Amino acid sequence: MANVTDLQTKYSKLAQEYSKLRAQNQVLKKAVVDEQASTVSLKEQLKHRDQSLRKQEQEMDSLSFRNQQLAKRVELLQEELAVSEAKSKKGKSKVDSPSQHGLETQSVFDEDLQKKIEENERLHIQFYEADEQHRRQEAELRGRLQELERDSEQHQTVVDGLTAKYIDTIERLQSDKARLEVRMVKCIIKSVKLSSFFPLCSQQQLRRCQSELNRQVKQSSSVIQEKVPFNDTSEYLAPRHLKARDVAGQALSFIQDLVAALLNFHSYTEQRVHIYPRDSSIEPISPLNQKFSQYLHENAAYVRPLEDSFLQLHQSITEDTVTVLETVVKLKSFADNFSSYTHFLQKILPYQLKSLEEECEAPLCTAALTAKNQELQGDMKRVTSVFEKLQSYINILALPSVRQDAMLPSSTSAVFTQLAACLHSLHDAIKEMSKHYNQKAGLEQELPTITQKLCTTSECLLGSLGSLTSSTGKIATFFSNNLDFFTSPGYSPRGGTVTLNPLQAESMLANKKKAAAYMYAIKKPRPQSVPYREALSNRRILTSSTESREGLTQQVQQSQEKIARLEQEKEHWLLEAQLGKVRLEKENQRIADLEAQLAAALGGSPNTQAAAASTLAQSHEEAEKELQKAVGKETTLCTSLVGDEDSREQLIKTHYMARVGELTTQLQISDSKAVHFHSECRALAKRLAIAEKSRETLSEEVKRANQNITRLQDELTTTKRSYEDQLSMMSDHLCSMNETLSKQREEIDTLKLGSKGNAKKNKGR
């Protein structure tokens, strides 16, 4: 249920992030639409400018044609002037001083006309060059506009792709959520069904079964005492290794969770050192933090061996071994690896304290943040000291496997008790550190310079601290619950207090195998004082009694274990049923809230909700049918018990044995399904982490796309302004050219009139 809660929390966070990204996507679409509108307006403006340019070109063509006409007329005037000059030379003798003055005036006009013609040619050349430059600039701007349009289309394609990816991710998560809800409901129904079987067995039937079993135990004990000459009732050969292997397997799962939490904690701490108080992507971090980051990068070399060595310890506990401190040799390697990790914590402790002091020296660090950093310094010191104590106790427990007679049983019990207390202290210290770090993260989010990268890293660090708190709490609770097993006396001779050494354990196992081989008549070559067949023929009654003793003893032990286990499971499932009802109500309320939020944020998905509702209804109907079938079976069995008085006891025994077997099978099936559900939840959590990473990469891509769009908008604005400036300059230049041409036209007309007047005067003369 905790994994489902974490998954739903992460799913709600992902939904919030998706709503934010969706809003940003809408803003981006609006920006792209605005960009397209501005592109269309620029095209319209360019079209109008082209039209005005064509008009100006037509005007320039007309002006050039007019200029050519004027040039031809000027040439004609020059020819007429040359003819008039030739005539004037012929009649030079007849010309007096006033005619010389006219010639001088005519020469001045000719020089002025020549200057005007040269200026007209120069202006025509300048106009042609300006026209060519304008055409080149227009071609360049057209190419630039096409590039901008292509970039805009590419950005629109990227935006559409991101939108499709987000929609696919949301649909996949919704389907996963519906599937998980259906599985959760099925598991709850199964747990309710299993818990409903136990109240059907009344207390009277249990007492009757127990009295019957006690009677059988007494009868078997009397038979064993009368018929069996060898009866060792001590706990010397008790199956202690089975309990030890079970306990080691549970401890291995807790150690694996602890190792994963420690790896995440050190890794996220390393990421935070690179981000705060200095971002390594902008400026280099301090040498102290560089050294601290280097040490944190090596954490896997110290944390991973803890899991590997404990796995070897678990594998060394088998059915053919005697499990005591003196024979568990692999405990020494685990103690060595734990010592190396404790030394690693001692090595990084000064750097942790200095790093927090450096955060306190930051310019924006408030007094509240400084106080939280000081509290965290104290928490880190406390955690390191608790790990040192744990190292000492584990090394003491590993001593008997290296040196015989290193510890007495009484001192071993005291060490185990102190170790349990130390594990609880570790849980309290890490819980306090997690609380202080949560408060510190809340204060950091109020800072104006906080970055999204730092917020994400702080959330991941808080998650790893929560996992570390949970795993240490589970380990402390597990050790306290099994403290009686750890402190109980192990294998020892009857009535003695001396512990076994490895040689004694080996000889004890060999004797046990020989005894079992003898009892079960395994044909192996061994020295025999009496042949087996002769002993069997002579003492057939004794052998049959021995066989019956073995069978009855096993049946009694199995019955007692099953009764105790069933009573425990009954209480456990009753509590689980009550807790399941409460959790189901909470989960239903939470799921309703989440569905309302998703419907409000995404417009709802009625098909998915209808499918989930139909699936839930079908699962409820199946559960009711199964309960009705179980009740029918119970009724049939109860009615069959009333039939015959002579076979009543045998029927009751058969019924309860069948019920016990059925319940055991159902319990195993439920355990396997719970394990499968747990593995699926872990796989979904990994998929959610991958989705979060992909979301981060997509958000980075969206940011880069926004930056590119902003840059393109700035470039487009700059280009637009340069176009407007150039067009205004061209219009001013054209106006000045028109004024110059009009002045030249007026001067040419004036010169033409003056030349006509001179010609008339010359003709009159």
Image (cartoon, rainbow, N blue to C red):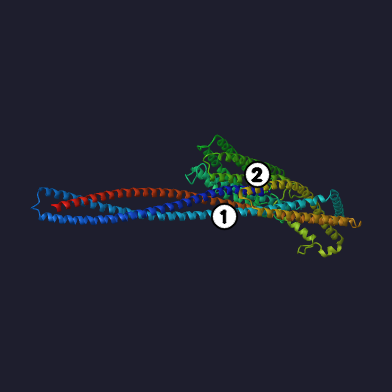
| Residue 315 placement (x, y as % from top left) | 67, 55
Classify mark 2: helix, strand or loop.
helix
| Outermost residue to the top | 367
Neighbours of disc 2 within 10 Å: few (<14), some (14-19), many (20+): some
Residue 752 left/right relative to 294:
left
Q: Quadrant of residue 447?
A: top right
State which quadrant residue 319 falls in.
Answer: bottom right
Would you name the residue on which mark 1 appears? 165
Checking the image for residue 393, the label placed there is 2
Q: Residue at x 32, y 53 (%)?
A: 130
- Front in this rendered view, residue 165 or 559: 165
The mark tally for this picture is: 2
Towards the viewer: 302 or 700: 700
Who is closer to the viewer here, 619 or 505? Answer: 619
Observer able to see residue 616: yes
Which amino acid type is marked by label 1? Lys
